[in-house]
Every structure is written in C-alpha cells, then in structure tokens.
Image (tube, rainbow, N blue to C red):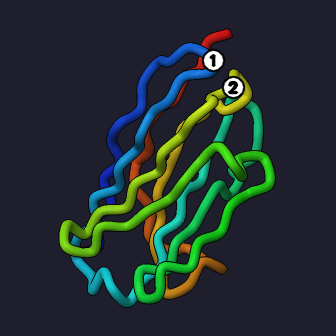
Amino acid sequence: EVQLVESGGGLVQAGGSLRLSCAASGFTFDDYAIGWFRQAPGKEREGVSCISSSDGSTYYADSVKGRFTISSDNAKNTVYLQMNSLKPEDTAVYYCAADSTCLGMNYWGKGTLVTVSS
C-alpha cells in the first residue's frame, strides 16, 4: 500500500522558514516522482514543486522559485521542501504526492498546514 506522510507544517512569521518532510512507503522510491502541492482556503490546489527520484530533476512554480528548495533522500525514502522567505500568501495546506512522473499524481498524503503570519 502506497503511503505518503507529510510533516513539518506550523505557524511562522513572514520572512521565516520551515522544512516540510514527506515520508514515502509502499513503492519503489527510486522509480517515482514526488511533488508538493498546496491549497489555500477558497482557492484551487496548485503545484509547488516536484522532484524525480531517479535523476534528481526538479521543477518549481514561479511563485516559489528562489525561495523553496526540494530535495530527496533516497536512503530514507523521504522528500523535503525547504521553504525560506515565507510570505502570508504561502499559507495553505501542503500535500505531497507521488507517481511515475511529475505530470500526473495518483497517490496523495493527507497534508500539513502551513500558516504564515504577517
């Protein structure tokens, strides 16, 4: 059974940092892409970042480029999202997801809430 468990969310002031973790199990980690998505209250879910565990290719939404960094520890089956220079508009529930490529995700975690205060 595929499982994705997010952690690391919380309350932070604008300009601060958080690191989210996504612990994965139930599939061959090296063969999958892991993505981070977020959904703010009243808004649609949007893609934030994605990493291919096989070759380390990374992708970022324009809104987070230069502030967020995605990384993968294949030995721990864990993907991280380092979030720096956080802004109130980054407030959302952050989900990690997995599939064979970054173009479509069929496996989802339950999410972790990030709140950035102004």
Q: Nearer the viewer, residue 66 or 50?
A: 66
Q: Position of residue 91 (x, y in %)?
A: 63, 28
- Image: 19 above or below 73: above
* Residue at position x 44%, y 70% in the image: 107
Q: Front-most of 30 and 44?
A: 30
Work out whether 77 lies above or below 23.
Answer: below
Neighbor class of circle 2 (other Cα within 10 Å; few <14, some 14-19, many 20+) is some
Asked if residue 5 lies left or right of residue 66, the reply is left
Q: Position of residue 87 (x, y in %)?
A: 69, 26
Q: How many marks?
A: 2
**Amino acid type for the residue under numbered disc 2:** Lys
Q: Residue at x 72, y 52 (%)?
A: 65
Considering only vertical position in the picture, is 17 above or below 11? below
**Residue beneath the point at 27% across and 82% down:** 27
N-terminal of the two: label 2 or label 1? 1
Q: Label 2: which residue?
A: 87
Q: Residue furthest front?
A: 66
Q: Quadrant of residue 89?
A: top right
Using residue 107 as the reference point, say whether residue 90 is left or right of it.
right
Residue behind mark 1: 14
SS under mark 1? loop
Q: Residues within 10 Å of mark 1 (few under 14, many from 20)?
A: some
Q: Are marks 2 and 1 in contact (CB under 8 Å)?
A: yes
Q: Secondary structure at mark 2?
A: loop
Amino acid type shown at disc 1: Ala
